[in-house]
Amino acid sequence: MDKGQLIMLGQSFAAHAGLELSTVSTYAANDGKWLNRLQGGASCTLRKAAVVVQWFSDHWPTDLEWPADIPRPPQSREAA
């Protein structure tokens, strides 16, 4: 998982849901500026990336195809 893939997930989710990237960032990372900072060149820990990808996997819209080039983790027990 690289930060470009995290940004792609955020942008795809935001566009599909009609939300701002900052809103999606708040939901996924508990920080409204997190995805924008990644776009600007910031880095993140592997743990944070895993948490964010898991959030996307758990909340991904059923009518939006998950990007084929991004490995998708299974849904967590809380989301099932």
Image (tube, rainbow, N blue to C red):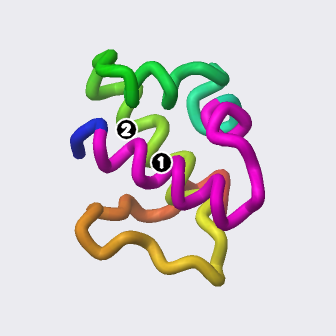
Give the amino acid at mark 1.
Gln
Per the image, the residue denoted by label 1 is 54
Give residue 13's quadrant in the image: bottom right
Per the image, the residue denoted by label 2 is 50
Side of 15 where 36 appears, left or right = left
At 60% from the left and 38% from the top, the residue drawn is: 28
Q: Nearer the viewer, residue 36 or 45?
A: 36
Q: Main secondary structure of the magenta part?
A: helix
Which region of the structure is painted magenta?
Answer: 4-25
Give the amino acid at mark 2.
Ala
Q: Nearer the viewer, residue 44 or 51?
A: 44
Task: Say what secondary structure mark 2 lies in.
Answer: helix
Q: Nearer the viewer, residue 42 or 59?
A: 42
Q: Is 25 above or below relative to 59?
A: above
* Total number of numbered discs in the rendering: 2
Task: Say what secondary structure mark 1 lies in.
Answer: helix
